[in-house]
Image (tube, rainbow, N blue to C red):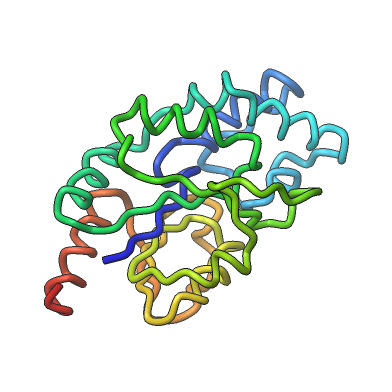
Amino acid sequence: MRIYIDFDDVICETAKHITRIAKELFGIDLPYREMQFFNLQKVFELNDAQYDRLMEACHTPESLLAYEETPHAARVINKWIDAGHDVSVVTGRPFDAYEPSREWLDRHGLQRAPLFTVDKYGREKKFQSFSYGMTLAQLYGMQFDFAIEDSPDAFEHVLHFEGCRVAVFDRPWNRQAVLPNERFTRCSGWLEIDQLLDDIAALSGS
């Protein structure tokens, strides 16, 4: 199977780290479980300047390398690669966050998983042509059989992959979201996602 895996809050615990950064920068003490929105500016009630400062802080190499691994992520992903699945990590992080992101994956035993940065949310001011960088149009030209996402804002992107089954990684900011169709399944963590993929593979005979 061709598998699409989002990075933040799927492979690593980005939001939990960002709550600590927001407290250090602005004195905002918002528990992770109360992050009801994917939009960080909205969830922390920041003005534009504060939001830009937060985004800069959470994308420094030091911050990106400090994110904790989501439990069982690397083990399950490597299990899938060993089984012959074609796994890609597809992130909406800024293009200039590629190098520390690649280093994080390597440090956590995911050297075999290719990483692609995609302008998922229209944040890139100027597209740069890197081997790892993609426009949304280029992403939509790919095909995946299984995807893992946490962001309601990204559901529209994976809908472009015909027949793709989607595991929605359960997070506070997506619990009120309406799942687009029956191909989307909410999962509580990597062990449940692994079981879902096994069930899909068994049904399809792959």
Residue at image location 54% in from the left, 64% down from the top: 139
**Above or below for 147 versus 46:** below
Q: Quadrant of residue 71?
A: top left
**Of 88 and 65, which appears nearest the observer?**
88
Find residue 2 and report its horizontal and vertical position in percent: 32, 64
Q: Which quarter of the rendered picture does the C terminus lie within?
A: bottom left
Between 98 and 79, the one lying in front of the other is 98
Q: Looking at the rendering, which quadrant does residue 148 occupy?
A: bottom left
Residue 142 location (% of width, % of height): 47, 69
On the image, which quarter does residue 170 sit in? Answer: bottom left
Please provide percent x and percent y for residue 201.
Answer: 17, 70
Q: Is residue 98 left or right of residue 48?
A: left
Q: How many marks?
A: 0
Q: How far across and down, in percent of the image, does residue 95 sit?
A: 64, 42
Q: Residue at x 22, y 46 (%)?
A: 76
Relative height, residue 21 to residue 101 (above, below): above
Answer with left or right where residue 66 lies relative to residue 204.
right
In the displayed structure, would residue 206 be above or below residue 94? Answer: below
User: Which quadrant does the N terminus fall into?
Assistant: bottom left
The structure residue drawn at horizontal position 38% and vertical position 74%, both measured from the top left corner, is 164
Q: Is residue 79 left or right of residue 184?
A: left
Residue at coordinates 22% horizontally, 55% vertically from top-left?
Answer: 194
